[in-house]
Amino acid sequence: MNYHPSITASQVYKSTFTAHSTALSEAVGQTIEVSYSAEQQTQLAYFLRLLKKANNENRWIMFVGYDALIDKSLLKNAGIDINKVLLLKASEHQSKHNLLVKALEMGNCSAVIVAGDIEQFDTPLVNSAAKNGKAMAFVLNKNLTTHLTVH
């Protein structure tokens, strides 16, 4: 397997900001990792900024599974229209990977968000579906543990 380092929400946001681009075309076609914890929420802040940009399109923002869902007040405070947010309930008959691919391919979403490990979702199939659907694919990793070294 050819593993390439994943791209983070902050890298995507900074690249679109420095290019003075309102389009998110740079982020389409690659899986974007959002790792954060209660102590470290920088990536979450960049993720919410990217979602706000995606929300400007006349398409949905879809969360795949309850574990990917972000608190409604957080979304509202970030300026995201809750009426354009959908939750796709994951079933035991379909993997979250397949649901992510289908949601991206449909083209009705500007962003599709799933929770898990980036290695599980950063696949050629997901990246191709994101490119074809012109959507951003986010993988949330809320279980990041921070290691502090005390001297």
Image: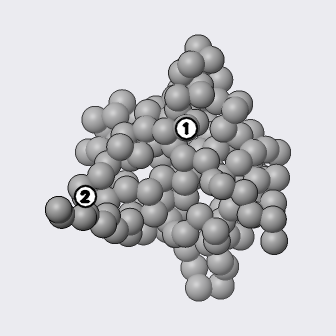
Q: Is residue 44 left or right of residue 127?
A: left
Per the image, the residue denoted by label 2 is 38
Say if 85 sits above or below 64 in the image. Answer: above
Of residues 113 and 40, the one nearer the viewer is: 40
Percent position of residue 32, x then y: 59, 50
Tell me which label, 1 or 2, sits earlier in the chain: 1
Determine whether the residue tagged by mark 1 lies in a helix, strand or loop. helix
Say if 141 sits above or below 6 in the image. Answer: below
Say if 53 sits above or below 97 in the image. Answer: above
Report the quarter where the N terminus lies. bottom right
The residue most toward the front is: 151
Q: Is residue 4 left or right of residue 79?
A: right
**Which residue is depicted at the point 54% across and 21% down?**
17
Cα distance in 3D space between marks 1 and 2: 21 Å
Q: Amino acid at mark 1?
A: Gln
Determine whether the residue tagged by mark 2 lies in a helix, strand or loop. loop
